[in-house]
Image: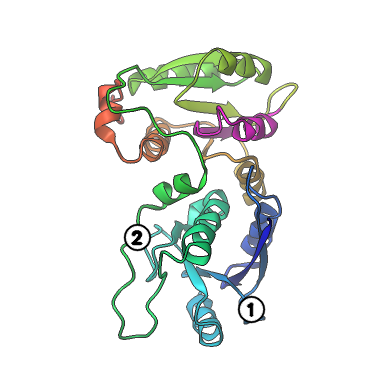
Amino acid sequence: MNRGYVVALCGLSAKDARLAEIVLSRPLPGSTRRFTTVSGADTAQADIAVIDLSSPHGDGIYQRLRAARPDVVPVYVSEHGTGGNSRYRIPARALLLQLQRMLELVAEEALESNKVRAHPTNAGAAPAVPARPVATQARAVADVPQPSSADDRRPLVALVVDDSETVRTQLVAALERVGVQSRATPDAEGAINAMRERSFDLILLDVVMPGIDGYELCRRIKQDAYSRGTPVIMLTSRSSPFDRARGALAGCDSYLTKPVTWAAFSAEVDKVLIRHFRNDRTLMTARGYRAGNGG
């Protein structure tokens, strides 16, 4: 049965509001939920409120909405994803990548199972339940296979998909520096064949390739029951919000903008892998991972 929820956008810029609408226009693979965005200033019927704390008006709009709709569940957007008195928080730069999965989590926990109270019922109430890391929340919604068990000591292996031999060579070398083995291929066909042969712990995927482009390949990866749990970092020379919205619609987990620096590469790989392994850095190290090795 399809479930529909109204999401009030409180203080988001017109551009971010439009991109959020685009991202939410397609449900996650396998989901029966539908999310409709509205302006927080225009409705008292919202189920969820997304509040941009960088806006001078965002929290005020939410407070007025909450006065009319006490059960509305807040999702706070802030620079580092730590602002707001709610367990549901998103870093501003990851809004488009995490929004849909976060809303799925809110629907599952706060609206359907009624397990969680997202905010106090009044100003004197106890603080909200401490927030789990946003990355862990997002994975809980994705309905993906669990990471490898604690006794699994296989080396980490990444799949690099880029039509540039130079870029492939550079990425393979960078992965080696952090203790991740890799397999490289120049196109989507090679990637699909590689994934038929084995599973991967990470996929680095170029956006622009001959034939099937990176967006379509990412969409196929995330729609496949076997591979959808594999984190995908998309590589692009374009980093506009609309390009990021396309990546979010395809289901990618993160972005790297070319030319990729070592600092950006090592930080993003570390962030994505620690999310994938649910903060179990001991297991990652046991499988050969060396965070940021080489400086």
Magenta range is 213-235
Q: CA distance from mark 2 to mark 1?
A: 26 Å
Q: Which image quadrant: the C terminus?
A: top left
Residue 247, percent from left and from top: 62, 41
Residue 152, percent from left and from top: 31, 21
Q: Nearer the viewer, residue 5 or 157?
A: 5
Q: Identify the residue at horizontal 45%, vertical 56% (top origin).
A: 91
Q: Identify the residue at horizontal 41%, vertical 64% (top origin).
A: 115
Would residue 164 be seen by someone viewing this image from the given angle? no
Chosen colour scheme: rainbow
Q: SS of the residue at dot 1? A: loop
Q: Are marks 2 and 1 in contact (CB under 8 Å)?
A: no
Q: Identify the residue at horizontal 40%, vertical 74% (top origin).
A: 119
- Left or right of 62, for residue 19: right
Q: Quadrant of residue 8?
A: bottom right
Q: Compare marks 2 and 1 and give the one earlier in the sequence.
A: 1
What amino acid type should be assigned to the residue bearing mark 1?
Gln
Q: Nearer the viewer, residue 234 or 122?
A: 122
Q: Which image quadrant: the N terminus?
A: bottom right
Crowd band around label 2 with a 10 angstrom C-alpha radius: few (<14), some (14–19), many (20+) = some
Residue 131: image tag: 2
- Residue, disc 1: 45
- Left or right of 180, for residue 2: right
Q: Is residue 79 magenta?
A: no
Crowd band around label 1 with a 10 angstrom C-alpha radius: few (<14), some (14–19), many (20+) = some
Residue 251: image tag: none
